[in-house]
Amino acid sequence: MPDQKTPPVLWTPSEAFRSNSRLQHYMEYLREKRGLNFLEYHALWLWSVERTADFWESIWEYFEVINHAEGYERVIQGERMPFHQWFKGSRINYAEHLFRYAEDARTAIVFQSERMEEPIEISWAEVKSQVAILQQHFRELGLKPGDRVAAFLPNIPEATMAFLAASSMGLVWSSCSPDFGTNSVLDRFRQIEPRVLFAVDGYTYNGKPYDKREEVARLKREMPSIEQVILIPFLRAEANFNEIPDSILWNEMYRSDAPPLSFEAVPFEHPIWVLYSSGTTGLPKAITHSHGGVLLEHLKYLAFHNDVHPGERFFWYSTTGWMMWNFVQAAFLVGATIVLYEGSPAYPNLNALWAFAERAKINHFGTSAPFIVACMKKGLSPKGQFDFSQLRSISSTGAPLPPEGFDWIYQEVKEDVWLCSMSGGTDVCTAFVGGCPLLPLYEGEIQCRALGAAVEAWDEEGKELIDEVGEMVITRPMPSMPVYFWNDPDKKRYLASYFEKYPGVWRHGDWIKITNRGSLIIYGRSDATLNRHGVRIGTAEIYRAVDKVPGIEDSLIVNLERPDGSHYMPLFVKLEQGVELNEELKQRIARQLRSDYSPRHVPDEIIAVPDIPYTISGKKLEAPVKKILLGMEQSKALSRDSLRNPEALDFFIKFAKQH
């Protein structure tokens, strides 16, 4: 593992930044209202995880949660995760809180697609009108709280409006991006049996059109629960949907007599949406969250860890098939305008999103670590081309961001921007660890454990580790942990997913190191660990080193344990165009790994591949590739339909047969 020296500080909040932060305001509130005086962040965090009920009750009170019941019985009931109950007896609605700042003249949504030259702005008046129309339409269809509404939509304003209408009525939302394979969509939506499906005729990506009308017709045909398909022409203004029965066009729902908005108060634990695991091995887990759980969590995280203020513009590059889409909608809770982009982040070139940040006047810019690394490796320097005077923060997630990615942001984007590297998951629809407006930012490190997230690093025996790499666990409950998996009444799949290794303690599946300063480093998925001769190596370490080598576009590493006890650790590399994997390049890779880490990090073989396989949500397929190389049939190792680029698997299947 890396050495213990303290990395350089890249950013420190100014006194004005600290004092104007919403987290500082919350600490002053705790002092005035509860007599709690915290002098620094770690003391506040410690209280938040040791006094779980007190902390989450303070969040409820600080944000003045709208409760339509006479109070609640108690903050939390139950002895062991995941069988806790939160705020029993309360009746709330997540969407009602999204509309708190909905002043008609204010901009609610800024939107641009790769086919548009300039973004458009949509007012709250327009959003409220459309959501009211949708509510009335849902009532006429006879939808009631608990019924499911599914969406096969790109990241367009209509998706946001449909979600707002569904959640406002206590309906359960679920969405997939139209770049999902049809079988992958069916694997997800069939589990929840939606009554209504929103869909588009198609979309564009990298300038190429993709017609999805046949896929939509198949979804309707193979899901008998769907009573109506609401169609949105997006690829073509006059799309022909004749092949799809029981369908209606979005604009055909228009009515001038729709009553004003209303909100259905539901129990705290009432399901709000169903998100899905990657589904690379078996049926995707249908992860179900609650109105109350995500309300409290999103209020806390957006306000305190992203420091989003009313009137600011919040953006995250995402599709409707990734939890970050849901997280973006949550920015309404804190009074922000949400910013949506539909299309490729690299069309017509990698500067597309940086140009969009200028045009859309984005204050908080969210992206993935692979995007930042790609910009870095292409030698981009956006700061010299675009006006980022409005940009306060850049957030990164999806994979560990290497130290060089941190440096690139400060050298080539904006020298005084707040970089918020964060990590969480679909499992909780938030981050366990992330940014803090009160703390310095160290190169290559995540600033802090989030309030209320009792994150620890454990060894195999369940002993807490500091300044050592261990299994990431969460030892106290959080409201946004799933209420259940759909169709998992006895919680067998739920318990097996998180609580099998350490009963009563959430095992997240990441290797993590918590420094003595309270900052963190994530080393990749623990289920893809390179356990080489008894030494555990995080895959992120390999990628950090290999990313520094010119000519390498991407890479994937696995370690295979042979029956005789020996190990074989191949490194697969995708080369930049025109680059050849010769002996000199192999030696450069080996020297980089040996220099940055240790001789054990040097692979047994380096192999060029046409492409690296990824899930639709952007995760490298380390574990499934390992299974294939160990001889498992591809159909048992993973579902090709869950992949962004399934053809990338062909090399590994052929390689396994030859070796």
Image (cartoon, rainbow, N blue to C red):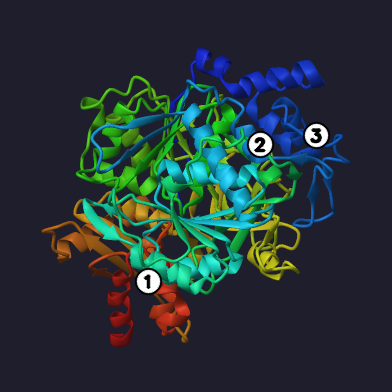
Q: Position of residue 595 (x, y in %)?
A: 32, 52
Q: Position of residue 417 (x, y in %)?
A: 40, 26
Task: Kindly indicate whether the residue at mark 1 contacts the one at mark 3 (C-beta within 8 angstroms).
Answer: no
- Pointer 1 local density, CA inside 10 Å: few below 14, some 14–19, many at least 20: many
Residue at 30% of width from left, 30% of height from top? 413
What is the quadrant of residue 168 in the picture? top right
Q: What distance separates the C-alpha of mark 1 from that of mark 2?
A: 59 Å
Badge 3 amino acid: Asp
Residue 636 tag number = none
Q: Which residue is mark 1?
A: 569
Of residue 502 and residue 603, the one placed in the foreground of this image is: 502
Residue 262 tag number = 2
Residue 305 can be seen in this image: no
- Pointer 2 local density, CA inside 10 Å: few below 14, some 14–19, many at least 20: some
Q: Which residue is mark 3?
A: 54
Of residue 468 and residue 299, the one placed in the foreground of this image is: 299
